[in-house]
Amino acid sequence: MIRIHFQHFLKAVLLASFALFFIKLHVTGNIANYINPKYDLMSLIAAWVFIILFFIQLFRIWEGEHVHEHCSPSCSHDHDGGGIARKIINYMVIVFPLITGFAFSPTILNASIAANKGPVLPHLSHGENHTEVIDNENYMVEEEYEQKLASLGDLEQIEMTADMFSSYHGEMLSNPEDFVGRKIRLSGFVYREQGIAENQLILSRFLITHCIADASVLGMLTEFSQVPDLKEDTWLELEGILDMKMLNGVVIPVIHASNWKVIDEPQDPYVYPVLVKIL
């Protein structure tokens, strides 16, 4: 007699749901709000694995009725390895990310998240630079990367493009004196850290190394001639002149804003470390 095995049916539904979730992320483009784009292929492979496992599971839903080899028809032993309570907990752990993934839209990291990440600028309690300089990821041929990095010292105006944002930011933090008097143009969101002046803000971008769980904040202290009427999380495109100043015993770069405008949040608001390809 053929019957439907409920647990196999439930597993098939879960596999199909995970496959649909990954497909939805790629179709909508929201996958970029969760992971570094370099992992897009891996997530697509995961979606295909879920699809294959789903079809395998389909054939296990319908099965013939049988009696266990070592037990009588009245056997009350649990052959599935675990009680009902444990199974419910296991399924809840699996179902939870599906419910949250389908029910809630991804949230773009903002100033409130930056505040939870800890200070961007050096503070007296630490007395050191807390910005982690990462020199890999974000695919680029070695020759191209070296050329862009070497040209930084000769640029009349530094363009903080997304591909080189983290590398240029690291160079300016390491050697702020080399950039005094240079023009700079960049975009980012407004973040205000406790202890900065009223006419100052930190123009920031989130650096995503692998996924949003390891996001770190890259920020440039920016000064205005007058107090700007700007709320946190406002996105700016800004031009200014680089200078340096001592803050809590640490010399840091600072931008004197000369021209700026409010812009819409970019489609991809994050920046990524550079991965140098050696050919």
Image (cartoon, helix red, strand yellow):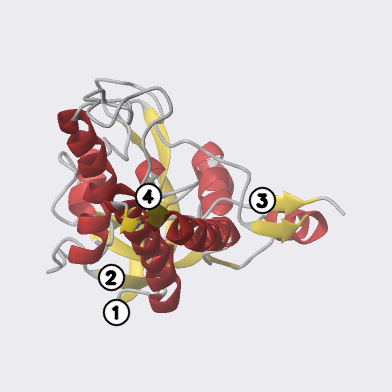
> At 38% across and 44% down in the image, what residue appears?
216
> At 51% across and 43% down in the image, what residue appears?
176
Which residue corresponds to mark 4? 212
Q: Left or right: 18 with respect to 248? A: right
Q: Left or right: 127 with respect to 38? A: left
The first of marks 4 and 3 along the sequence is 4
Query: Marks 4/1: CA distance?
Result: 21 Å
Which residue corresponds to mark 1? 264
Q: Position of residue 152 (x, y in %)?
A: 65, 57
The first of marks 4 and 1 along the sequence is 4
Which residue corresponds to mark 3? 275
The crowding category of the residue bearing disc 2, from other C-alpha atoms within 10 Å (few below 14, some 14 to 19, many at least 20), is many
State the quadrant of the N terminus. bottom left
Q: Which of marks 4 and 3 is in front?
A: 4
Query: Dots 1 and 2: beta carbons under 8 Å?
Result: yes
Q: Position of residue 231 (x, y in %)?
A: 13, 65
